[in-house]
Image (cartoon, rainbow, N blue to C red):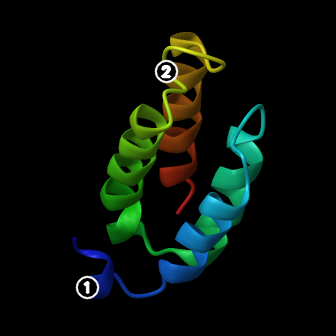
Amino acid sequence: MMEGNIKGSGKAIECMEKESLHGQMEDIMKEVMQWTKKKDMAFLAGLMERDMKDFGWMGNSMKKEHFIMSRKAFRKMERWD
C-alpha cells in the first residue's frame, strides 16, 4: 500500500477510521482537508471508496446517492485551494 509515501495523511486516515462516516461525510471531508495536501486527494478518494466497499456500506446502510453526493462535496472542497 502507498500510505508510507503520503506525507501528512496519517492523521486524516486515522480520523476517517475513527469516525463511522454515516451521515458525516462532509464534516469528515473538512477535517481531512485540514490534514492533507492537494496531491493526496486522489489517494484519499480511492481509500474511501475501498473502505466503503469493504464495509458493505454501498449495499447496506449507505445509499449510492449519498456516496455520489459525498464525492461531489469532495471535489468541491478540492477546488477551494
Say few, some or many: other residues with alpha carbon within 10 Å of mark 1 (under 14 / 14 to 19 / 20 or more).
few
Q: Which mark is residue 41?
A: none
Q: Tell me the quadrant of the picture where the N terminus can be found.
A: bottom left
> Residue at point 68% right, 40% down?
25
Residue 5 vs residue 72, the one in the foreground: 5
Residue 10 position, x and y percent, is 50, 81
Amino acid found under the numbered disc labelled 2: Met
Question: Given this view, does label 1 or label 2 mark the residue nearer the observer?
Answer: 2
Q: Name the residue carrying label 1.
A: 5
Q: Say whether residue 58 is visible.
A: yes
Amino acid found under the numbered disc labelled 1: Asn
Say few, some or many: other residues with alpha carbon within 10 Å of mark 2 (under 14 / 14 to 19 / 20 or more).
some
Tag 2 secondary structure: loop
Q: Name the residue carrying label 2.
A: 58
> Residue at point 37% right, 68% down?
40
Above or below for 69 versus 46: above
Q: Quadrant of residue 18?
A: bottom right
Left or right position of 28 against 56: right
Tag 1 secondary structure: helix
Residue 30 position, x and y percent, is 70, 57
**C-beta proximity under 8 Å, tags 1 and 2:** no
